[in-house]
Structure formats: structure tokens, C-alpha cells
Image (cartoon, helix red, strand yellow):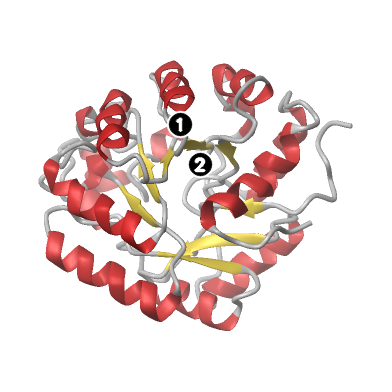
């Protein structure tokens, strides 16, 4: 059968190209190299080919919706931290899944208040963390993160956490994959989904997924032809329920490229529907689609 061209797809990392930029200033403020500060439009630009350019910023929601329709994305999870994200989930609740503002463990009480407010106002289905992007940096297993994990459990929502070597030129130690072992031990009811590949520790991520029932892996920021072989092999054997599709539009990847490369990924037939939509719906508490 191979790639099912008519399958629903839930994209667990999609967004909008906003007018004026500035969304990466929090990273640029931490970097020290000249390219990051003066040349890159986004901090991990050196890693990507074919970054979407020239997108109309007058109506970012319509642009993203058009791309979703063109390339078969049924639902997209977007952050309500931006005006476009808030408008998207309000005006197109059948197409966009609300995700909370990225958590800031340097402002624990502020983050907890934001999580509660966004859960009440938007019905957020998850939150996200970027350990290497916090300033000062806060590791995945740092005690400052623990009230946030506890609130996720209390609200019944997962956290999508960037893990592995950071793309931006900042220190990566806070995202060492082995730190997740501490988190899952202390919060066995927490649902944690890794983002951005876990490289070069993808084998360790698989070992931890075998160990912890509530630990998952999403393919964000990776073009399909670069999905780690170990992750594909795991999905085809014991991990079919653990691997979740995510793109990276418009930050680093076009949906056109992703859709063109997906059919070449050697997933077994039974893996495709789980990877494309079933696992995401289950983890996010959404009704089944397709």
C-alpha cells in the first residue's frame, strides 16, 4: 500500500509568517556569532534548504490554510501566543488545534497563570517547551520545570519538549535526552512528546520510549528524507503507537517539500495512519478522524 494519499493528516507543528518578524529575538539575544545576529532570518537557518520565502503577511492565517489545503493537512496545531494563532483557532476551530504559549520556567507563576487562562479561554490541547531557548537556560529536568509538569498533569494536557542538539547556536546541554528519564520517573502521568529529533541521541530516545508509556516522539523540523533510520525502524517494530507527524512550516520547511518526500519513507502499512493522525488525536484528546 505505502503512503496513503487520501489519509487525514494532523500536523503537530505548524504556524504563520507574521509581518515584521521579531519572533526569534529571544534567541538572537543569546547568540554570540555574527551570522546568527546579523545574517540569519531565523536562528537555525544554516540547517535548512528551501526555507519558505516571500509569503504574504497581510493575512497569515489564510496563507497557512491555503498551504494546508494544497498539501492535504487536515488539522494543524498552532500556538495561541500570537494574534494569528488566536484568530485561527477562533475562526477555524475545525482546522486548527490550540497550543499554549511556550512555557517559561524563569517565570513559574506567570507561566502557570498563562496555562490556566489559555486552557479556560482557548481549550489548549498542549503546551510546548524549548529548554535551550530559555534565558537563563533551564534544563528539562530542572526543579523549575516541575510545577509546569505538574500543571500539565492537572490540566490533562501533554507537553511538547524540544530535545537533542539545539538548532540555534546556543548551548544544548539543557536538552540532553537522558534528562527525560528523570522527568518521566517523577511524573509518570505526564505525557511528553519530544520535538526536533533528539539527535544525536535518537537511540536513547527510543530506549526511553520503550521504558516510559507516556513518552512520544514527533518528527518536527525534519524533512522526511532525513527521518532518523532508528526512529523509522522503531515505528515499524515496537513503536507504531509512539511516533507522531509534525512539520515545520513556515519556519524551516515547506509543506510542498514534506508532502513530496513522505511517500519515500519506508514505514510499514500499519504505521502510516497512526503516524499521520491516530497517535496525535489520541495524545491530544481529539476525536478520531478518517
Q: Can residue 53 be seen at all in this image of the molecule?
A: no
Residue 47 lies, in percent from the top left, at 43, 33
**SS class, disc 2:** loop
The answer to which quarter of the image holds residue 35 is top left
**SS class, disc 1:** loop
Q: Quadrant of the C terminus?
A: bottom right
Q: Can residue 30 be seen at all in this image of the molecule?
A: yes
Which residue is at the front of the view, 2 or 83? 2
Q: Locate residue 15 relative to residue 83 in the image: left or right.
A: right
Q: CA distance from mark 2 to mark 1?
A: 7 Å
Total numbered badges shown on the rendered structure: 2
Q: Which residue is mark 1?
A: 197
**Crowd around label 1: few <14 · some 14–19 · many ≥20 (10 Å):** many
Q: Give the residue displayed 60% in from the left and 65% down from the top.
A: 64
Residue 202 lies, in percent from the top left, at 44, 21
Which labelled disc corresponds to residue 220?
Answer: 2
In contact (CB < 8 Å): disc 2 and disc 1: yes
Q: Earlier in the sequence, mark 2 or mark 1?
A: 1
Which residue is at the front of the view, 100 or 120? 120
The answer to which quarter of the image holds residue 124 is bottom left
Q: Quadrant of the N terminus?
A: top right
**Crowd around label 2: few <14 · some 14–19 · many ≥20 (10 Å):** many
Q: Give the residue displayed 85% in from the left and 50% down from the top.
A: 6
Which labelled disc corresponds to residue 117?
Answer: none
Q: Give the residue displayed 31% in from the left and 45% down from the top.
A: 39
Q: Give the residue displayed 53% in from the left and 35% down from the top.
A: 222
Residue 131 lies, in percent from the top left, at 24, 42
Which residue is the extreme one toward the right? 1
Q: Is residue 268 above or below residue 79?
A: above
Q: Is residue 27 above or below residue 122?
A: above
Amino acid at each position: 500500500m505505502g503512503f496513503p494519499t487520501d489519509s487525514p493528516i494532523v500536523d503537530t507543528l505548524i504556524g504563520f509568517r507574521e509581518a515584521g518578524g521579531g519572533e526569534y529575538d529571544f534567541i538572537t539575544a543569546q547568540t554570540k556569532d555574527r551570522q546568527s545576529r546579523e545574517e540569519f532570518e531565523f536562528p537555525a537557518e544554516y540547517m535548512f534548504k528551501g526555507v519558505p520565502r516571500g509569503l504574504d503577511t497581510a493575512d497569515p492565517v489564510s496563507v497557512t490554510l491555503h498551504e494546508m489545503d494544497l498539501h492535504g493537512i487536515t488539522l494543524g496545531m498552532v500556538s495561541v501566543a500570537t494574534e494569528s494563532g488566536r484568530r485561527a483557532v477562533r475562526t477555524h476551530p475545525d482546522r486548527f488545534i490550540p497550543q499554549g504559549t511556550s512555557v517559561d520556567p524563569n517565570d513559574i507563576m506567570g507561566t502557570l497563570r498563562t496555562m490556566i487562562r489559555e486552557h479556560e479561554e482557548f481549550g489548549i490541547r498542549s503546551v510546548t517547551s524549548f529548554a535551550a531557548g530559555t534565558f537563563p537556560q533551564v534544563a528539562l529536568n530542572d526543579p523549575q520545570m516541575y510545577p509546569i509538569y505538574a500543571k500539565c498533569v492537572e490540566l490533562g494536557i501533554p507537553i511538547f519538549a524540544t530535545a537533542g542538539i539545539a538548532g540555534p547556536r546556543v548551548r544544548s546541554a539543557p536538552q540532553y535526552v537522558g534528562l527525560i528519564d528523570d522527568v518521566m520517573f517523577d511524573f509518570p502521568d505526564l505525557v511528553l512528546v519530544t520535538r526536533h529529533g533528539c539527535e544525536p541521541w535518537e537511540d536513547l530516545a527510543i530506549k526511553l520510549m520503550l521504558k516510559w508509556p507516556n513518552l512520544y516522539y514527533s518528527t518536527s523540523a525534519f524533512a522526511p528524507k532525513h527521518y532518523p533510520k532508528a526512529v523509522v525502524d522503531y515505528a515499524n517494530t515496537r513503536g507504531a503507537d509512539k511516533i507522531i507527524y509534525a512539520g515545520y512550516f513556515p519556519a524551516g520547511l515547506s509543506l510542498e517539500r514534506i508532502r513530496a518526500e513522505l511517500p519515500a519513507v519506508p514505514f510499514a502499512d500499519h504505521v502510516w495512519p497512526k503516524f499521520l493522525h491516530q497517535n496525535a488525536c489520541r495524545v491530544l484528546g481529539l476525536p478520531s478522524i478518517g
